[in-house]
Amino acid sequence: MKLLPLSFALVFSSSRLSGAIVYSGEQSLSVTWDDLEGVYVNIATGATAVAFPSDFDDAPWINLTLGGYGVFNSELINPWTVSAGATYDPELATDYYVNVEPGTLLGSTITFTDLAFGSINHVGAAANQFILGQSGLLGFSFQEEVGGDTYYAWVRFIPDNSDAGILVDWAYNDAPGESIEAGAVPEPNSVLLLMAAGGAFVARRRRG
């Protein structure tokens, strides 16, 4: 899949149009296999960190560690797990965060799991597991704050146990309660229109 340049994505995400896909752009953040801290991403703001964020419990953070073999998150993120809303047990080899097919509709028809804070068994040979060295998609719902609206999102990453895993990109639908397809990014035409509008605004400011 061709990824939009980051400059396009930043213009699009700053517009905050109703029902728009807010896209990170291609990030390709490296997470080495022996890195216990890894990379943190705030899905709502796009902020990243390499140390535990002070607001981890109060914002929608996802944490990729150990080359992608460890995925952790704050309580404001509800991932799609094998147990699908039932009591989640990350210590079971058969319970983990699901690798969803591209194009899967992530929304209210999916039972996301509350109180799931991490996954360590999601890499393997099963059809719904992430595959070593290949990109996969994690689908989830999240809130920007406790008691806030629900949004639907995805994160793409490539697990690796010998060198470095890659956190590739992520996106969410900024309309509360509206679905997003796993792997979906803004349509180029929409981004170009926003860039043109932004250019016209700058031109007017300069003339003024």
Image: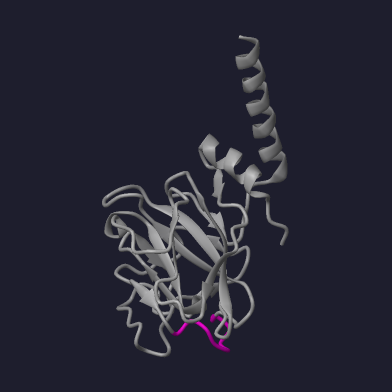
Q: Position of residue 169 (x, y in %)?
A: 57, 60
Residue that appears at 43% across and 80% down: 96
Q: Is residue 126 magenta?
A: yes
User: Which quadrant, please, contains the C terminus?
Assistant: top right
Residue that appears at 31% across and 48% down: 148
The answer, for residue 17, to whether it is visible in the render is: no
Q: Position of residue 201 (x, y in %)?
A: 62, 21
Most common SS among magenta residues? loop
Count of numbered circles in the view: 0
Decide if residue 110 is on the left or right side of residue 29: left
Above or below residue 208? Residue 36 is: below
User: Which quadrant, please, contains the N terminus?
Assistant: bottom right
In the picture, residue 120 is in which quadrant?
bottom left
Check the image and tell me how it is coloured. Answer: one colour
Task: Give 166 or 176, whichever is nearer the viewer.
Answer: 166
Hey, which residue is sitting farthest top in the picture?
Answer: 208
Above or below residue 207? Residue 109 is: below
In the picture, residue 203 is in which quadrant?
top right
Q: Position of residue 60 (x, y in %)?
A: 37, 56
Task: Give 116 or 73, whichever is nearer the viewer.
Answer: 73
Task: Give 19 or 68, whichever is nearer the viewer.
Answer: 68
Residue that appears at 72% across and 40% down: 189
The answer, for residue 6, to whether it is visible in the render is: yes
The magenta segment: 121-129
Residue that appears at 58% across and 81% down: 163
Q: Position of residue 153 (x, y in %)?
A: 49, 57
